[in-house]
Image (tube, rainbow, N blue to C red):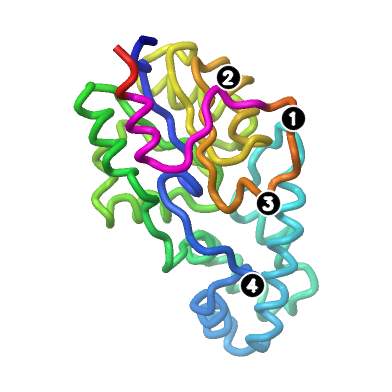
């Protein structure tokens, strides 16, 4: 049997938790917060359209290869605020941290099936774990994991808005392995997208790149040159993979 990983690195969205796909890219609570913050300088429908268009433009930018991450302020300045009246731009600039949190947060996030069982199995084997995730607000992800009782499983949580780079840049994984004090060549990385997660794992030279399928996986363009070492459906499968190691 292969050896147990020196560390288990996991993506957040699509691996640890997920939310149903939504066509509108802005939660109603965020639209209302901006409407109140700007004292009605923009109508709610205008705010919703700006956020939806901005999210689509941000997603296209994120598909660039090896991108450095933008700061929260840069995301708003580049993708949302152009064309807004000054009366709306000024208060938003002063609240980008909270607004970014609200934009990243999903009220319908749910822990994926079998994840707690996989995390428990890794902890029983004394395998350190870390989250490695692209996000506009790592604070939102951290709070969700704490809220559902999963935060204590992780010795490190690496988020792109705090690291200044984003997957597939391998620095994301190396930040995690540096913090855990283990070589990347002895670690497993689990993600749900070939072009970001499997590519990042290959560039970081981890021991095993594992694809956990999610609804997002099927929306990704084909990447035949990015084959995972294993493909799984959920946390139960990950637990079973760990059970086959020494």
- Quickly name the residue at label 2: 204
- Real-space CA distance between mark 2 and mark 1, rounded to the nearest whole angstrom: 19 Å
Q: Secondary structure at mark 4?
A: loop
Which x, y percent locates residue 221?
75, 44
- Real-space CA distance between mark 3 and mark 1, rounded to the nearest whole angstrom: 15 Å
Q: Residue at x 49, y 41 (%)?
A: 159
- On screen, residue 245 versus residue 35, left or right, reads left
For marks 2 and 1, the one nearer the N-term is 2
Which x, y percent locates residue 210?
51, 29
Residue 94, quarter of the rendered image = bottom right
Q: Residue at x 38, y 23 (%)?
A: 179
Name the front one of labels 1 and 4.
Answer: 1
- On screen, residue 118 versus residue 195, left or right, reads left
Q: Residue at x 74, y 34 (%)?
A: 223
Residue 52, quarter of the rendered image = bottom right
Residue farthest to the right, as pictured: 83
- Quickly name the residue at label 3: 219
- Real-space CA distance between mark 1 and mark 4, rounded to the nearest whole angstrom: 30 Å
Q: Is residue 236 magenta?
A: yes
Who is closer to the viewer here, 114 or 92? 114
Which x, y percent locates residue 172?
54, 30
For marks 4 and 3, the one nearer the N-term is 4
Q: Secondary structure at mark 1?
A: loop
Which x, y percent locates residue 67?
70, 36
**Which label sits on residue 24?**
4
- Mark 2, other Cα within 10 Å: few <14 / some 14–19 / many ≥20: some
């Amino acid at each position: 049997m292969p050896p147990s990983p020196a560390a288990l690195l996991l993506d957040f969205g699509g691996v640890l938790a997920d939310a149903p796909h939504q066509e509108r890219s802005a939660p109603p609570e965020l639209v209302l917060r901006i409407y109140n913050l700007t004292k009605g300088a923009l109508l709610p429908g205008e705010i919703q359209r700006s956020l939806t268009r901005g999210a689509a433009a941000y997603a296209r930018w994120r598909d660039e290869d090896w991108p450095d991450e933008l700061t929260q302020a840069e995301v708003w300045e580049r993708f949302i605020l152009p064309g807004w009246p000054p009366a709306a731009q000024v208060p938003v600039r002063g609240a980008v941290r909270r607004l970014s949190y609200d934009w990243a947060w999903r009220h319908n996030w749910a822990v994926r099936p079998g994840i707690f069982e996989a995390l428990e199995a890794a902890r029983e084997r004394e395998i350190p774990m870390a989250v490695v995730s692209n996000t506009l607000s790592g604070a939102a992800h951290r709070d969700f994991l704490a809220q559902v009782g999963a935060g204590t499983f992780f010795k490190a949580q690496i988020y792109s808005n705090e690291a200044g780079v984003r997957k597939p840049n391998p620095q994301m994984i190396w930040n995690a392995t540096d913090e855990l004090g283990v070589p990347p060549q002895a670690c497993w990385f689990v993600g749900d997208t070939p072009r970001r997660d499997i590519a990042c794992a290959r560039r970081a030279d981890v021991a095993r790149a594992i694809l956990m399928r999610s609804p997002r996986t099927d929306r990704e363009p084909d990447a035949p040159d990015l084959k995972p070492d294993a493909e799984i459906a959920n946390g139960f499968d990950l637990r079973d993979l760990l059970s086959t190691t020494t």
